[in-house]
Amino acid sequence: MQQKNFSKSEIAAHYNEFHDLYEKWSGSGHGGYHFGIMKKWTDLFSNDRMVFNMSNKIISHIPKKENQVILEAGCGSAYVGQLVINARENASVIGITLSERQAHTANAREKKVKKAPNVRVGNFEKTVFADETFDVVIFIDSLCHGTGPAKKAAVEETSRLLKPGGTLIFADVFLKEVPKLGDKWYHFINTKVFDLWKVSQWTEEKQWKKILSQNQIMIVTDENMTWKIVPSVLHLFFIKFPTSVIAYIIGRGDKKEMQYLFTAAIFAPLVGLHPYFRYKIITAKKIHNV
Ligand SMILES: C[S@@+](CC[C@H](N)C(=O)[O-])C[C@H]1O[C@@H](n2cnc3c(N)ncnc32)[C@H](O)[C@@H]1O
């Protein structure tokens, strides 16, 4: 199976092209373009609620210190960044995304709120920020877009940007082992998801953790969330996709939305059920130089 490598401009083009749909699905201000978790059973009917719960869970890992400078790496329209500002009043949040449209949407919010994240178009593998600028760096469903299975460039750059003692938070897909070339079923379903989301390779946990330790980063917590994101995947399958089909049939829908949701609702759960797959929240610290 040939490995596709999506360029940064192809990833940016995807988020620009699907900007309006992602905003429609997640633009309530409740927390972004990522998987969600259920706190009570009624959340199952509200993707917003589940995404919001996940955002808050991730934010709870940010230390409660004064005047922190926080980077949201791969920030979408910075809905999580906005929640971070609301939760940690003295914090300054900078977001970077490859998508000009997301940056524009995020920065337009500045006029509506007291304090907003400052969002720039940039590549988290090579940024313009000075060494040791940030107290906290957060990656939510964005590390997967980084280069290679160990995400070496993203880790090296993040280590450079973090202050010693600084905190790193990742929420993403991590592969338990390197997929076997002969595993045709896995490669078939996975390619559908990769083509849809413009991901070249998921992060392979062991290789990635080795790169972290080579870059003075030590894991602090490691939580397997695979089963906890199932309700948000079920929501996609049983509510979002059928709703888009009905809307299309009665002439109020959008073909592009329905096609996107078909692939996401069918193939993402199949990949998720595969034993290689895990969704995790991992936190880490940059150790002080000795
Ligand atoms: C699935 S979205 C997640 C957005 C956001 N973290 C959230 O949870 O709402 C992935 C984001 O990663 C960004 N991204 C992917 N690769 C990137 C890179 N190399 N540098 C900066 N941003 C990147 C995309 O532009 C997009 O905003």
Image (spheres, rainbow, N blue to C red):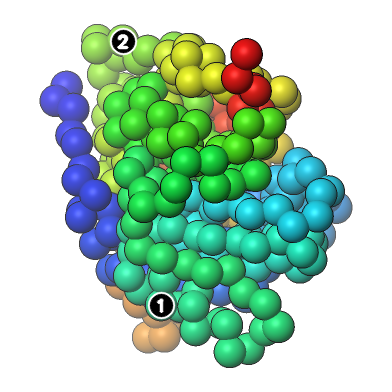
User: Hey, what amino acid is under mark 1?
Assistant: His
Q: Nearer the viewer, residue 207 or 197?
A: 207
Which residue is nearer to you in this view: 70 or 141? 70
Q: Name the residue located 40 percent from the left edge and 58 percent from the top edge.
A: 97
- Which residue type carries mark 2? Lys
The reply to whether residue 52 is in sight is no
| Label 2: few (<14), some (14–19) or many (≥20) C-alpha neighbours in 10 Å | few
Report the residue that reaches farthest toward the bottom.
111
Q: What element carries label 2?
A: loop
For this orientation, the residue located farthest to the left is: 2
Of residues 145 and 198, which is closer to you in this image? 145
Q: Tell me: 227 left or right of 175.
A: right
Which residue lies under the disc numbered 2? 180
Across and down, in percent, residue 39 comes to 83, 50
Give me the residue at 62% from left, 74% from top. 116
Depth check, mark 2 against mark 1: the one in front is: 1
